[in-house]
């Protein structure tokens, strides 16, 4: 008889998702372009990936601050000042740099306050269950990021009513909220920029629905932070003009190129999360060197240099969009720093990514479960430090590759919900 660990290992290898990826690796050993190893980083966005030098169009360090000398100096200064780690959870103590970083972050965002978590994932896993009780409801956009979906599952396990609604669909949202009445409060959880498509939600309409239904808008703006809005403050302030009745989650690891995530909120919410949110109480914080770097990044974002970086990013994104449309590629999104090129079939999508790699470009070939079956995409992430020549060469390569593999995907309905338009998480 197998020992329990061997039995568990065999059982996990038969799990649906594990079998799916195991078959993917076996069927496409040189094609799948997953679990790669980056050996070196060169000038700009050149990287040596699995032994080949390529231009990286898969980086979410959108402004290029990961290579900024002042940010690197801040990290070095933070190590020398604080060491490599805080040494305890924030329930016991925080280094001064943590409080300073939160103050600077809130000031830059023009928000009442901010609370920093070690990642956006831990922010959503920790905040969503902590914000509500069994008297409340949580409704989630169908295509909200996986970590919002996982946070909702934890909330459901605590007795909170949860459901999903059709993607970016105000009517479905109202129907879903109506199903749960009466409730004390509700949270509407959405993305500020949808990471696979680069599309934006109808924030104004969702805020109206929230106010009319005793609900709070909760926006994961990880892919808008540092990229969209005035001085990169994100989609919420840009579209709504304020943070009234809105909680905003953002990333410190993407456009801002540091480490961690945050939630912008009022001081009362911040205090409640510090004592109710599991990752805050029972987990380690962002390492102090990165907290020093966050303050330096805030200096950059508030300076003329920050405006130049944003302008360069938007110029690069605009150039990509114009060239891609001109080449007949039909990119989706392209509002911030992400555009997706629809391919469709899984094999065609993986083949397209491999062919681009062989032509000297790394672009993420995204397939199920990150997108629906047969809705594979090439996700292009434009950075401020890409050159115009690199962008032109990428579009030329994309056009050649798409012509070679073809596109097989068909548009699917926004959601596959139950007949009444509502489904549980």
Image: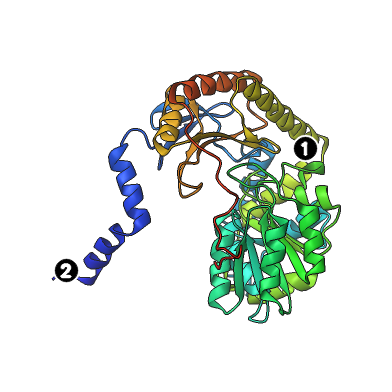
Residue extending furthest front?
419
Disc 1 to disc 2, C-alpha distance: 59 Å
Q: Which quarter of the picture shows residue 159? A: bottom right
In the rendered image, the vertical position of residue 122 relative to residue 229, given as above or below: below
Residue displayed at 78% across by 34% down: 305
Quarter in which the N terminus is drawn: bottom left
Residue displayed at 60% across by 41% down: 60
| Residue 306: numbered disc | 1
In the rendered image, the vertical position of residue 152 relative to residue 381, given as above or below: below
Q: Which quarter of the picture shows residue 334? A: top right
Residue displayed at 50% across by 48% down: 370
Q: Which of marks 1 and 2 is nearer the N terminus?
A: 2
Percent coordinates x, y for residue 8 in the rendering:
27, 66
Label 2: which residue? 2
Q: Which quarter of the picture shows residue 346? A: top left
Pointer 1 with pointer 2, Cβ within 8 A: no
Q: Which of the two residues, 258 or 201, is positioned nearer the viewer here?
A: 201
Mark 1 residue crowding within 10 angstroms, few (<14) / some (14–19) / many (20+): some
Q: Which of the two residues, 102 or 119, is positioned nearer the viewer here?
A: 119
Percent coordinates x, y for residue 392 in the rendering:
61, 19
| Residue 16: numbered disc | none
Q: For the image shown, how many numbered marks are present on the structure?
A: 2
Secondary structure beneath dot 1 equals helix
Depth-wise, is mark 1 or mark 2 nearer the camera?
2
Secondary structure beneath dot 2 equals loop
Mark 2 residue crowding within 10 angstroms, few (<14) / some (14–19) / many (20+): few
Percent coordinates x, y for residue 299 in the rendering:
78, 44
Residue 119 seen anywhere in this rendered image of the structure = no
Q: How are the residues colored?
A: rainbow
| Horizontal side of residue 277 vs 36, given as left or right | right
In the rendered image, the vertical position of residue 280 relative to residue 331, given as above or below: below
Residue 111 seen anywhere in this rendered image of the structure = yes
């Amino acid at each position: 008889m197998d020992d329990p660990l061997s039995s568990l290992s065999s059982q996990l290898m038969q799990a649906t998702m594990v079998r799916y990826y195991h078959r993917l690796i076996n069927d496409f050993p040189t094609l799948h372009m997953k679990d790669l190893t980056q050996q070196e980083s060169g000038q700009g966005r050149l990287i040596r990936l699995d032994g080949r030098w390529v231009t990286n169009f898969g980086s979410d360090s959108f402004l290029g601050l990961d290579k900024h000398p002042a940010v690197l100096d801040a990290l070095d200064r933070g190590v020398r000042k604080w060491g490599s780690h805080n040494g305890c959870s924030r329930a016991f103590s925080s280094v001064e740099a943590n409080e300073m970083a939160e103050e600077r972050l809130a000031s830059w965002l023009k928000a009442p306050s901010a609370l920093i978590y070690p990642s956006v994932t831990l922010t959503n896993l920790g905040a969503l269950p902590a914000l509500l009780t069994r008297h409340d409801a949580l409704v989630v956009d169908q295509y909200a990021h996986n970590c919002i979906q996982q946070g909702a599952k934890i909330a459901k396990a605590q007795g909170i009513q949860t459901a999903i609604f059709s993607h970016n669909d105000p009517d479905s949202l109202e129907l879903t909220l109506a199903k749960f009445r009466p409730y004390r409060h509700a949270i509407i959880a959405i993305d500020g920029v949808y990471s696979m498509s680069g599309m934006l939600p109808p924030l104004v309409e969702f805020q109206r629905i929230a106010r009319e239904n005793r609900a709070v808008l909760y926006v994961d703006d990880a892919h808008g932070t540092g990229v969209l809005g005035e001085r990169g403050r994100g989609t919420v302030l840009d579209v709504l003009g304020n943070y009234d009745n809105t909680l905003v989650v953002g990333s410190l690891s993407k456009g801002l190129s540091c480490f961690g995530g945050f939630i912008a909120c009022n001081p009362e919410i911040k205090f409640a999360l510090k004592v109710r949110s599991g990752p805050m109480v029972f987990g380690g914080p962002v390492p102090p060197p990165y907290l020093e770097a966050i303050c330096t990044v805030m200096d950059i974002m508030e300076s003329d240099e920050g405006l130049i970086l944003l302008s360069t990013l938007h110029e690069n994104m605009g150039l990509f969009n114009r060239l891609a449309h001109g080449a007949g590629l039909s990119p989706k999104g392209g509002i911030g720093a992400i555009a997706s090129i629809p391919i469709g079939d899984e094999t065609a999508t993986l083949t397209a990514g491999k062919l681009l790699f062989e032509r000297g470009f790394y672009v993420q070939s995204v397939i199920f479960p990150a997108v629906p079956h047969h809705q594979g995409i090439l996700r292009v992430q434009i950075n401020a430090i890409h050159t115009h020549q690199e962008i032109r060469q990428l579009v030329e390569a994309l056009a050649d590759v798409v012509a070679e593999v073809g596109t097989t995907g068909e548009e699917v309905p926004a959601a596959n919900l139950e007949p009444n338009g509502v489904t549980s998480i």
